[in-house]
Each structure stands twice: as C-alpha cells, then as structure tokens.
Amino acid sequence: MSEMEDSQSLTVERDQAGVIVVHGDVDVAGGPILEAALLNGPSDSQVIIDLGDVFFIDSSGLRCLLGVSRRAHEQGTNVVLRHVGNEVLRLLQITGTTDQFSIEDGRG
Amino acid sequence: MADPLNSMIGPVLIRLPPTPALSRVLRLAASGIAAMAGFTVDETEDIKIAVSEVWLALIEHGGGEPIEVQFSVQDHVFMVRGQAAFGGFDVDHPDLALCRTVLAGVCTQHGIELVDDHAQIWAAVAHASIT
C-alpha cells in the first residue's frame, strides 16, 4: 500500500486493488487532501473509496466526493463508497445526495 | 442532582486564525460543552457538524480575517456563533448553498448574515425533548 497524502487529520492511500482508503476527518482541512489524491488517480476507471475509517465529514468533504462523482459520471462510470458509517450516511441523506454514489457496504 | 440540560454554560469565546486544521479543535471544544450540558451522542454529532459548517463557511468566505467562535448552552439549546470582520461577505454565494442545506438538516435554526461589516453565521441545536 503506497501512501499518497498525509496530514494530522487525514491520510489517503491506494491499496493494491486500486481502492482509495481514507483515514480521518473529511472536513475543510482534510477535504482538499482527499480531492488532490482523487485527482491523481486514473480517470477512466471506476473509483472505489473505502470510508470505513472516516468518522466525521462535513459539506467540504461532501463537495469533494460530489466532484469526483460528477467527473466519474462524465466518464460513463461511477463512484463506489465502501464501508460507509452512519456519520457519512447521515450527511448524504440530509443533502439528498445518496443516489450520486453506489454504496456497497456499511461499516459493519 | 441538577439537570445538566437546565444549566447555562458560557458563552465560551474562542478567537482563532483562519487555519482549516483548527476545525478539529472547535469540534472537540463543542463536544465537551455538549457533554457537560447533557446532550445525547446523536445531538452532539449534529453539533459537531454545525460547528464545522460555521467554521468552513468563515474560512472560505470570511476574507482571511481572524475568526471568533462563541459557544453557549441556554434553555436546552446549544448555540454556536461565528464571525469574521469582513464587509465583503457574500451571503448569497453559491458555494454556501450546500452549507445551508447541511445546517438546515442538523440544526433547529441557523443564519448566515452580514451584520455591521462582519460575516456572521450562527446555528442552534436543541435538545430533542423540546423540539
């Protein structure tokens, strides 16, 4: 697993299967880190983001995810959110953006 | 034993430079105050989101000025108020739409205003027993 970005609040890694694994808070500090990491990935394949270690997200983080989703749709693919916890799910529901993503599994 | 939700806390005033990473500091402070006041875990999560939205909006639209954030609990309501001395604050900026949607979802009341050349954002989260 190679580390792509690092900070005190958020780290983003891409595992051997190409899944983007996020650890930390996706807020005004972490959102740009996630966005930069996502922009560095291949643009023509399905984006899978593992949010199992994300316990806080605000609208800046959601804006980042929605941007990736929009670009994916333009490429004819989609964004899969994996291991989504209640914190992320609640924000998606509040904003009515759940249908912008394929949600595979809960955090469990 | 006194009911913590009947107690008044604050106002607690925090003045910070507009540094994004300090969002966590504010959420931690808000969580502590919410716990002292007897808010539930779910209500505290909503409070953390509200605090983060206030901070985010002032970071992105507060003109780079220092930000004052005030927490208080009164009459079973957690209130967060943030302000920055920035007369150019555009309350109708399109980027604030998502912030408004989130605040509407987690708060009982909120406001995004320009008052006396200050960008002001406030949000109130009430304890479930009085909503």
Image (cartoon, coloured by chain):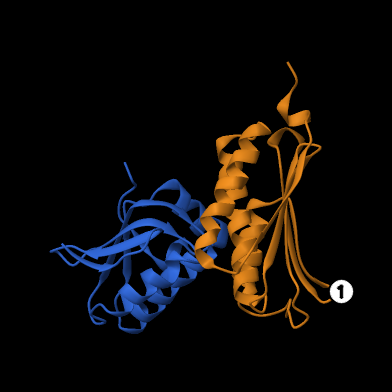
How dense is the environment of label 1, judged by Cα within 10 Å: few (below 14), some, or many (20 and up)? few
Q: Is A1 positioned to the left or the right of B15 in the image? A: left
Q: Position of residue B51 (x, y in %)?
A: 62, 55
Please name the residue shown 60% across and 71% down the image: B59
- Judge by depth and name the residue closer to the eye, B130 or B32: B32
Q: Which residue is mark 1?
A: B116
Figure quadrant of the C terminus of chain B: top right
Q: Residue at x 76, y 73 (%)?
A: B85
In the rendered image, the vertical position of residue B4 relative to residue B110, given as above or below: above
Q: Using residue B63 as the reference point, say whether residue B42 is left or right of it.
A: left
Q: Residue furthest left?
A: A16
The chain drawn orange is chain what? B
Name which residue lies at 38% across and 65% down: A101
Pinpoint residue B96: horizontal percent, then vertical percent. Answer: 64, 73
Residue at 73 percent of width and 30 percent of height: B5
Near-viewer residue (A17 or A69):
A17
Q: Chain of mark 1?
A: B
Dot 1 amino acid type? Asp
Towards the viewer: A76 or B91? B91
Chain letter, colour blue: A
Q: Please, is residue B128 above or below residue B21 in the view? A: above
Determine whether A2 is above or below B90 in the image: above
x, y percent for residue A15: 17, 62
Q: Report the quarter where the N terminus of chain B lies.
A: top right
Q: Position of residue B95 (x, y in %)?
A: 60, 77
Name of the residue lying farthest toward the right:
B116
